[in-house]
Amino acid sequence: MTTTTATTYVDLHCHSTASDGTLSPAQVVQLARDSGLSALALTDHDTAGGIHEAQNEANRLGIDFLPGIEISAEFPHPGTLHILGYGVNPDSPQLKSLTETLLSGRDNRNPRIIEKLNQLGVAITLQEVEDEAKKDLADPAGSKKPIGRPHIAAVLLRKGYVSSVKQAFDKYLAQGAPAYFDKERLTPRQALQCIRDSGGLPVLAHPIQLRTENDAQLDRIVKDLVDLGLAGIEIFHSDHDATWVAKCTQLADHYHLLKTGGSDFHGTNKKDIRLGVANGNRVPRDLFDNLRQALGR
Ligand code: AMP
Ligand code: ZN
Ligand code: FE
Ligand code: FE
């Protein structure tokens, strides 16, 4: 482990063009360096496609790096349950099979969303959305990339149907909006098990997005996840104000969970979020070190 005297900062939750961010994996690492961060974990949705590029750039720049992934699990409306997997082996057959399952869930969904948009008089095609997703990939032919609603939003924006990504979600794509169509998800049990099978540690992302009605319900959900093998909980996140940071810290202490934190940076797809900053909080280095230690690296 590195011995550092001064506190340095890290970011353990960010997205690249391998999923729905707007910077390439190498560019995210460069931005981490330029932002003064000493370590980074890349957590693209449903894919480890950016891990090797980011790892290589981190090695080159002398930034510590952990591979990661973020997957969505089944959870009742209106909440969402996202599980981060840290330390997953991007080359393991278990991870490949996991990401293939997740990608096919998206392949089934995207045409349905396009169909609904067409019925609403919005003239866009699946091909346009696929081209949008691939345009910023270094190796468009060789990579299978999770296509998501942000890519659909980008096409709507480019074609003038909306004036911002946010408006695309509000008007068409968000849960409850007229072109929403859910994707098949893993159960929480499957999500946690798949991450463990891939050599990773499962961490509950942004608990505020569970949209629990009260603290007792939140506690029960966390306890159930702990029983299924949860290893950590995200404390710092761009959606977490001081109350949520405190709530999640308490849960982590109570259930002996690792604490993590990150910005959920997406480049210009989420314009208000800066790499390394989670709602005004910075993420201290020891969270990264504890995670790496728990992974035995
Ligand atoms: P998908 O993976 O296709 O379900 O899309 C989920 C992604 O869409 C999230 O990770 C965000 O990046 C983005 N997203 C979800 N809701 C919104 C929103 N209201 N405004 C902007 N982006 C959103
Ligand atoms: Zn995203
Ligand atoms: Fe998320
Ligand atoms: Fe995220």
Image (cartoon, grey):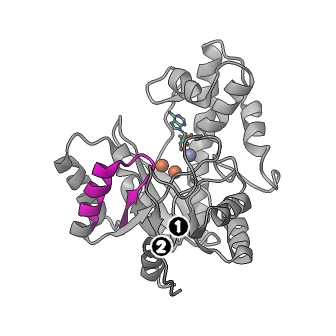
Q: Compute the Cα span from label 1 to label 2.
A: 6 Å
Across and down, in percent, residue 73 comes to: 43, 50
User: Considering the numbered disc 1 on the image, is that residue within a helix, a strand or a loop?
Assistant: strand
Q: 63 left or right of 187? A: right
Q: Residue at x 52, y 71 (%)?
A: 198
Q: Is residue 194 visible?
A: no
| Residue type, mark 2 in image | Arg
Disc on the earlier residue, 1 or 2? 1
Q: Position of residue 222 (x, y in %)?
A: 27, 57
Q: Quadrant of residue 35?
A: bottom right
Specify whether residue 58 is in view. yes
User: Which residue lies at the image location 49% right of the left edge and 35% below the top edge?
Assistant: 182
- Check whether the beta carbons of the residues at disc 1 and disc 2 lie within 8 A of each other: yes
In the picture of the structure, the residue carrying the numbered disc 2 is: 285
User: What amino acid type should be assigned to the residue bearing mark 1?
Assistant: Val
- Res. 247 image quadrant: bottom left
**Is 23 part of what is drawn in magenta?**
no
Label 2, residues with CA under 10 Å away: few <14, some 14-19, many ≥20? some
Within-10-Å neighbours for mark 1: few <14, some 14–19, many 20+: many
Residue at 47% from the left image edge and 78% from the top image edge: 289
Image-based side of 55 in relation to 280, left or right: right
- Nearest to the observer: residue 287 or residue 15: 287
User: In this view, which residue lies farthest toward the front?
Assistant: 6
Quarter residue 55 falls in = bottom right
| Total count of labels | 2
Res 10 label: 1
